Amino acid sequence: MDYDFLISSRFESLESQGKTALIPYVTAGYPNRGATVPLLEQLTKAGADIIELGIPFSDPLADGPTIQRSSFVSLEGGTTVTSVLNDLRIFRAKNELPVVLFSYLNPILAYGLEAFLSDAVAAGASGILLTDLPTGADPKVEESISRSPLALIRLIAPTT
């Protein structure tokens, strides 16, 4: 299935109904490793249109105290990039809701960019949002992501 397509079609459907999207964020592995899949399922039942699934990072400086705290707890509990992708795979087996992986670049590079892109697609990710990859900062990384089936989601500050 083309999960990237799910993002576009979800927004088109909502727009045609005059609605906006509900896109909750969840730090994978918070409050514990076993909570991620049930939480994703509950968000689906509660009406989420797309879910951002955070890959915890040890130095989430671009995020506020809530994501920082949940990332630290998650990492202390043993969450890894591999475990996040496994949780996504389990969720995806029963759900077609678009899921965007939310991460910093370092965990992805440590995993191996091409391996991550392949494994994220296999797990059912629809897109990736890299908080510390501004446009043009690393053309090779951007090109690799653009060649993959994942949508590259950009952050835009009010001052941009």
Image (cartoon, rainbow, N blue to C red):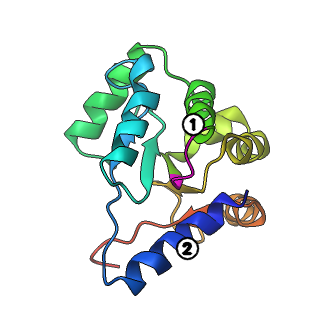
Say what amino acid the circle numbered 1 marks: Leu
Determine if the magenta segment contains residue 43. Answer: no
The answer to whether residue 61 shows anywhere in this view is no
Please provide percent x and percent y for residue 110: 66, 33
Q: Which residue is mark 2?
A: 8
Q: Nearer the viewer, residue 74 or 156?
A: 74
Q: Which residue is mark 1?
A: 88
| N-terminal label among 2 and 1 | 2
The answer to whether residue 114 shows anywhere in this view is yes
Residue at (63% x, 27% y) in the render = 82
Q: Nearer the viewer, residue 31 or 10?
A: 10
Please provide percent x and percent y for residue 69: 26, 29
Q: Nearer the viewer, residue 134 or 10?
A: 10
Location of residue 57 (image quadrant): top left
Residue at (44% x, 33% y) in the render = 56
Residue at (60% x, 41% y) in the render = 92
Q: Secondary structure at mark 1?
A: helix
- Image position of 133 (left or right of 75): right
Q: Residues within 10 Å of mark 1 (few under 14, many from 20)?
A: many
Please, is residue 98 above or below residue 103 in the view?
below
The magenta region covers 94-99
Residue at (57% x, 36% y) in the render = 88
Please provide percent x and percent y for residue 38: 41, 29
Q: Secondary structure at mark 2?
A: helix
Say what amino acid the circle numbered 2 marks: Ser
Q: Main secondary structure of the magenta part?
A: loop
- Image position of 72 (left or right of 147): left
Please, is residue 121 above or below residue 40 in the view?
below
